[in-house]
Amino acid sequence: MKVVKGYRHTGIICKDINKCLIFYRDHLGLTVIQDFWDDSEYINEITGLKDANVHMIKLKADDGSVIELLEYTSHPTNLIKQEVYNVGLCHIAFQVYNIDKAYEQLKKSNVELISKPVLSSEKIAKVCFCFDPNGIRIELVEML
């Protein structure tokens, strides 16, 4: 039996949702499609929390893929440094129009970058990584 029909979105828990909004909207160019708060029974039931209050912002890329930023204001959290080789979500990849222009724009905006764009081993893409305000690795890929 097939369970998965397709990809829906990626949720990112934020220490500071406003800093993350600036990164994803202003630096990467995603479009805000929803911005709302939820303290309903629904959110408490699906998360297993009590008295949850969540600020959620959904952003869409040109291809329709969605990133959901979430800040649990009722349950403050700390940033956790995670190495690239740790088990779990280690990065999110976005396909970009022009990686060299994207790299320069992010550099001018003081976004932390790991490297300049590099040709992939299989020579089909140029790739670089940066960090979002939560320390999540963001892979930028320009298919050649």
Image (cartoon, grey):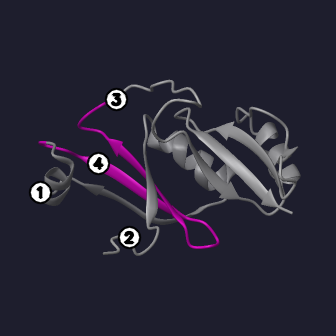
Q: Would you call the spot at circle 3 few (<14 residues within 10 Å), some (14-19), or many (20 or more)?
A: few
Q: The N terminus is located in which quarter? A: bottom left
Image: magenta residue range: 50-77
Upstream in the sequence, badge 3 or badge 4? 4
> The disc labelled 3 sits on which kind of residue?
Thr
Mark 1 and mark 3: span between their CA atoms? 21 Å
Q: Would you call the spot at circle 4 few (<14 residues within 10 Å), some (14-19), or many (20 or more)?
A: many
Q: Would you call the spot at circle 1 few (<14 residues within 10 Å), some (14-19), or many (20 or more)?
A: few
- Residue tagged 2: 4
Q: Quadrant of residue 108?
A: top right
> The disc labelled 2 sits on which kind of residue?
Val
Q: Up-down: is 87 above or below 66? A: above
Upstream in the sequence, badge 2 or badge 4? 2
At which x and y percent is residue 39? 19, 52
Q: Say whether marks 2 and 4 touch (CB < 8 Å).
A: no
Q: Residue at x 68, y 46 (%)?
A: 139
Mark 2 and mark 1: span between their CA atoms? 26 Å
- Residue tagged 1: 41
Q: Up-down: is 47 above or below 77? A: below
Q: Say whether marks 2 and 3 touch (CB < 8 Å).
A: no
- Residue tagged 4: 54
> The disc labelled 4 sits on which kind of residue?
Val
Foreground mark, 3 or 4, reads: 3
Upstream in the sequence, badge 2 or badge 1? 2
User: Total of numbered circles in the picture?
Assistant: 4
Mark 2 and mark 4: span between their CA atoms? 27 Å
- Residue tagged 3: 77
Q: Residue at x 35, y 74 (%)?
A: 2
Residue 118 tag number: none
Residue 109 magenta-highlighted: no
Upstream in the sequence, badge 1 or badge 3? 1
> The disc labelled 1 sits on which kind of residue?
Glu
